């Protein structure tokens, strides 16, 4: 049994004001060809297939086209779970009919807990989809009053799944969640505040493989067989050093797993350049790399007229400039230099300190965490109706300097 | 060959502030049972299945459930075209996979012009879906520079369809359009202003039957075999006298058509009551009819404290009160009495007249028509991205007095 694990496509994403749908179509063209070459037994997409619950219609058409080609041209079944960016109801339209064609979409939790069974020469493999779910929804759906946080919710859901797979059966979990210890990027939307979104990797130890989505860096989480495939593309400058790939997983007759990362080449890379304006402009790059999406950190401390205009003569897709040394006479300004990289918690804590001269007390910290959590949750719930962009994504997109 | 023709479900509609999804689920439950009893060869839904391009997710789930039951439980294939309220791209997601399960959704125009063929004992019947399309889209898709209005667009599209059906083949058109001579209600959104949205019935004469959507009254349009099924429910008080139904169409071996209206009973009727408050309150209704959605036209001319509160003690779902005689000493106030029933053209014309004392010149009328048309079009296009409600639906919903 060989399957390709991918996640976090975020179709329809806007990156610093640039609509990425064309870039996503470019890289998915490679992906479809890869699937056609490898002919795996399945493709598994572990959530956040769209960037928001009401994606632009270009994104809907792109997903339609990609899935059709994988399923009908390559004859490879596809399993998808909803992530926290997807609308579970919208993504799930027609799922029972589509499943009969080899497209298994799990928008809302399948409370029947019927696994998707795909066979190879050694017998069945049981795929158990765990879409992103808020703990209160699990509480209601499964009638478990004691479920308060993501950890308890995941324990409840995974427990149901494992009980539905015959003993000794090979089993693969798909989950969109934050496994404790995983490394974040700047392009994930937090599931909740203050660590309550983490779930221990132990929940997934019983599965032969767990195909995770949510964290945008490709990584193992608590075991080599519990993995994030990482996002399709780099969706923040913090990911400039990532190697984006999809994961080809091989499961033998006994359920032992090996895996391999298969790289995909974006139309334009996402890169960071650090230096003095004159040096950057002097080093004219060769080839296509000057078309990359670029963030420039300028070391100059004085005023510069139209820095972005000058940079764009060499790098037309400079999307963001940072000037940490501006007006500070060459010394780094403030801790970290960029308030956009701080979390809401850190931002407010530093603001409070500046204004009052005092640190937040533990009690005050708790109130703050609850408040921020509440705002995020409202934004999430509003998003289930029609995601408005909200304050989080606005912050992600940053500000052009 | 027997098929059921229905249209204009407008799932997710809000009627004077009331979300109708529960009422729609109630009537669709009847519809599904009807399909199960009759076991037709197909169900045909001629557009405006949703009320807006981004419907509430409850509407998405309702449609998913209804279609699944018709297709999988009743084993009856379903054909759907997009109407002017639907997003052609969103509605069309997965259409090629779904078609293989008997759900034929035509969101955007199928420029391959491949009919949906359903066979009976006498051979094939060719179903030709014509979703709602703006004339500029037809111009671009078919490369026909001379297409300016709906008439030319429909001629071009229907011409392609008829050329694709073998001579003598029985054929059925599905179209979401305004056939000239049809009777409007107050709940349709105009396709364009000033009559440019009308298409002659002659376009459809070659078809054995044309299943129309758009106008909410069940009616023939230019021939007994060119019909509007009418909307699923009454979506404005102007439809209080309508008999809402679906149309059972029978096509014999030679392509002759007979049809029959099959009524559906809503959970709550939509009714108008006209009289003096004291009389209305005195006539206590019996049975369920007091739960109906009601508009009251009060003949009283004096001030009344909390008229809606008093009326709701008897009719809990009074949604709208009109008081045409208020402060006019019993005489009808102004022409028509209700500016909400006037079109934008009429509203502005009357405003212009009041302010300037003069009539609009023909030249001024043209400028006005163009401007209103442009606003509608922008609203339509914005709706393709994410329908915001816009000024049209706000006006439709009226104001509680």
Image (cartoon, coloured by chain):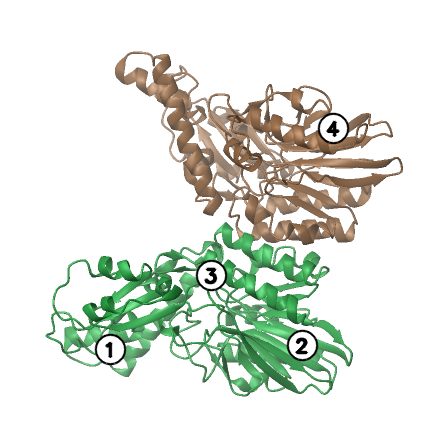
Chain colours: A green, B brown
Residue B379, placed above or below residue A192: above
Classify A373 as above or below B35.
Answer: below
Asked if the residues shown at circle 4 and circle 3 are in contact, with their CB atoms under 8 angstroms apart, the answer is: no
- Point out the tag, 2 or 1, that comes first from the N-terminus: 2
Q: Are marks 4 and 2 in contact (CB under 8 Å)?
A: no
Residue appearing at x 68%, y 54% in the figure: B97
Image coordinates for residue A26, horizontal then vertical, percent: 50, 60
Q: Residue B309, can we see it? A: no
Q: Nearer the viewer, residue A318 or B172?
A: A318
Q: Quadrant of the N terminus of chain B?
A: top right
Distance of label 3 from label 1 (alpha carbons) = 28 Å
The residue wearing badge 3 is: A51
- Side (left or right) of B102 relative to A59: right
Name the secondary structure under disc 3.
loop
Residue pointed to by mark 4: B209
For the residues tagged 4 and 2, is the chain the same?
A: no
- Choose between B153 and A148: the one closer to the eye: B153
Instruction: Output the chain of dot 2.
Output: A
Q: CA distance from mark 4 to mark 3?
A: 43 Å
Residue at 62% in and 34% down: B231
Tag 2 residue: A2
For the residues carrying marks 4 and 1, which lies nearer the camera in this image? 1
Residue A273 vs B319, above or below: the answer is: below
Q: Is residue B77 left or right of residue B362?
A: right
Q: Which chain does the numbered disc 4 sit on?
A: B
Query: Both on one chain, marks 3 and 1?
Result: yes
Residue for badge 1: A336
**Residue B363 in sight in this render:** yes
Q: Looking at the rendering, in which quadrant would you find the C terminus of chain B? A: top left
Mark 4 to mark 2: distance in Å?
A: 51 Å
Q: Residues within 10 Å of mark 4 (few under 14, many from 20)?
A: many
């Amino acid at each position: 049994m060989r399957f390709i694990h991918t996640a976090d496509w975020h179709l329809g994403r806007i990156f610093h004001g640039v609509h990425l749908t064309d870039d996503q179509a470019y890289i998915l063209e490679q992906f479809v060809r890869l699937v056609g070459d490898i002919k795996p037994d399945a493709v598994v997409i572990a959530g956040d297939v769209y960037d928001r619950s009401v994606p632009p219609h270009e994104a809907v058409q792109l997903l339609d086209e990609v899935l059709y080609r994988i399923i009908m041209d390559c004859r490879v079944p596809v399993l998808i779970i909803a992530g926290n960016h997807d609308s579970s109801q919208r993504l799930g339209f027609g799922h029972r009919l589509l499943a009969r064609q080899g497209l298994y979409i799990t928008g809302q939790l399948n409370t029947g807990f019927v696994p998707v069974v795909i066979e190879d020469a050694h017998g069945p493999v049981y795929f158990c989809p765990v879409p992103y779910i808020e703990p209160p929804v699990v509480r209601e759906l499964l009638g478990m009053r004691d479920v308060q946080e993501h950890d308890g919710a995941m324990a409840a859901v995974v427990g149901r799944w494992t009980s539905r797979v015959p003993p000794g059966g090979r089993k693969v979990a798909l989950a969109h969640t934050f496994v404790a210890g995983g490394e974040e990027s700047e392009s994930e939307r937090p599931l909740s505040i203050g660590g309550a979104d983490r779930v221990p990797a132990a929940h997934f130890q019983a599965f032969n493989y767990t195909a995770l989505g949510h964290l945008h860096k490709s990584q193992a989480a608590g075991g080599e067989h519990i993995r994030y495939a990482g996002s399709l593309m780099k969706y923040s400058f913090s990911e400039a050093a990532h190697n984006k790939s999809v994961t080809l997983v091989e499961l033998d007759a006994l359920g032992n797993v090996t895996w391999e990362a298969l790289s995909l080449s974006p139309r334009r890379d996402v890169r960071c350049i650090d230096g003095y304006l004159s040096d950057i402009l002097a080093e004219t790059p060769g080839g296509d790399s000057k078309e990359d999406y670029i963030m420039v950190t300028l070391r100059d401390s004085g005023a510069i007229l139209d820095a972005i205009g000058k940079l764009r003569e060499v790098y037309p897709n400079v999307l963001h400039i940072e000037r940490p040394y501006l007006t500070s006479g060459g010394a780094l300004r403030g801790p970290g230099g960029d308030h956009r990289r701080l979390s809401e918690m850190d931002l407010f804590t530093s603001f409070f300190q500046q204004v009052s001269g005092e640190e937040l007390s533990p009690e005050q910290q708790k109130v703050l965490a609850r408040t921020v959590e509440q705002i995020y949750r409202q934004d999430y719930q509003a998003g289930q109706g029609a995601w408005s962009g909200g304050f989080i994504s606005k912050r992600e997109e940053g500000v052009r300097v």
